[in-house]
Image (spheres, rainbow, N blue to C red):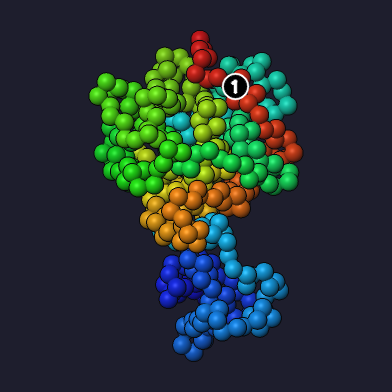
Amino acid sequence: LKCDALFTSPGGKTKSLVVSEDRYVYHDILGNRWFGTYSVTNESFHFQQEEDNLSPKEEGLTSSSDFREKSPEEIFCADPPVRKFQKNNRIIGLGPRSVQLACFAKWTEAHFGENLTSNIQAKSKACCSLFQTNQQPKILVFPRSHLEAAMHFSGGNILLKTIPLKNRSIDFNFIGRVNSKQPAATRARRWILDFAKSYFTHHSYYIDTTASHHESKYIRLGSWDRSIITPGFLPMDAMAKQRNGQVCAMARCDPSYYATLANSLFTLAPAGDQPWSQRFFESIMAASIPIVQSPEHTGRSFSEKLIGYKFFLASEFAARISAFRQAKKSNDAPLPYCADLAKYNLDLFLRHQTLIARRQTISPGLFLCESEAFNTLAFT
């Protein structure tokens, strides 16, 4: 059975498909519900809308709750369509920052239980200087310090697998370079400005980390542009510090960065110098829903893309917001937090992108994040 046949339907873009024996229940992105059967002879689906009065029992369903009218919040936070990726066995090499994060994650778990601050200078220097290209993981992993900082701000509970429905004060955020010395990276991020001008509000948070390089000429894009007011962590500057002797500077855990992500409903995660972004995974770690331009920008390898994270495409957002506002009968209704999607993503992240053997050992907090302080350590 090829579900690709469902990507186009009379109700709009595909949201989800529930299969029970030989009958099917289909939800489109606008919240409409369709019932159908599959014809083996014609190799096609035939769907009819909910008005056919088919009962849950007739459709092989066990809960009548599937038939209740969806709330505006449920419509907005509906599962994204099933994503398709181009199969490619090529694995894009990790950049310096990702290399340091991966090796430090390995070192941290190898020395878990020790006083991580006692010999952190000597051991982390050896870790980051000896990490070889052929040791790069197929799936990027992150250090415990980053995860615990992100969990500290998001308030997630690892054991109970819950994320509180707290009032996140930021609807959208972007922190990073908009313009790059690499033309491909600049082109890959042009959509950010269009998206920001369309959807960012006074509750949004935008920082172009290169603005400080030409502060006198920089013109703010709106009330949500804090590029000059609140400069962000600059990995490229950290690279320069590393050349001056600060080993592992780019593996720095930045509490303020994770505080912003964990206080945001959505994080814009455009491609960078390569057709993927580390920010995509960082937003998932902070329980913020990532928004990307293309499914191909959700990992550097086919294995990473197939982890199964749920994310939104920028091109889908107009329909999603329109359906939500129509259901709320208000153009000013604040967007809801999609906690179920965030919880689903975080569980996948813990299984695939950390080396932590036992979740019970995770202690949300800033101790490790602040004690590493790679930006201030100097090695001789």
- Residue drawn at x 53%, y 54% as measured from the top left: 310
- Residue drawn at x 65%, y 44% as measured from the top left: 164
Q: Which residue is at the front of the view, 62 or 169?
A: 169
Q: Position of residue 152 (x, y in %)?
A: 64, 33
Looking at the rendered structure, the kind of residue marked 1 is: Glu
Considering only vertical position in the picture, is 73 above or below 222? below
Q: Position of residue 245 (x, y in %)?
A: 45, 14
Neighbours of disc 1 within 10 Å: few (<14), some (14-19), many (20+)? some
Q: Residue furthest front?
A: 329
Q: Which residue is at the front of the view, 52 or 355?
A: 52
Q: Is residue 142 visible?
A: yes
Q: Is residue 371 left or right of residue 359?
A: left
The quarter holding residue 284 reads top right
- Residue drawn at x 69%, y 47% as measured from the top left: 161
The quarter holding residue 193 reads top left
Q: Position of residue 53 (x, y in %)?
A: 60, 83
Q: Which residue is at the front of the view, 94 or 32?
A: 32
Considering only vertical position in the picture, is 289 above or below 211? below
Q: Is residue 83 left or right of residue 363?
A: left
**What residue would you read off at disc 1?**
370
Q: Is residue 110 visible?
A: no
- Residue drawn at x 49%, y 68% as measured from the top left: 28
Q: Position of residue 274 (x, y in %)?
A: 37, 42
Considering only vertical position in the picture, is 308 above or below 275? below
Q: Which residue is at the front of the view, 342 or 371?
A: 342
Q: Considering the numbered disc 1 on the image, is that residue within a helix, a strand or a loop?
A: helix
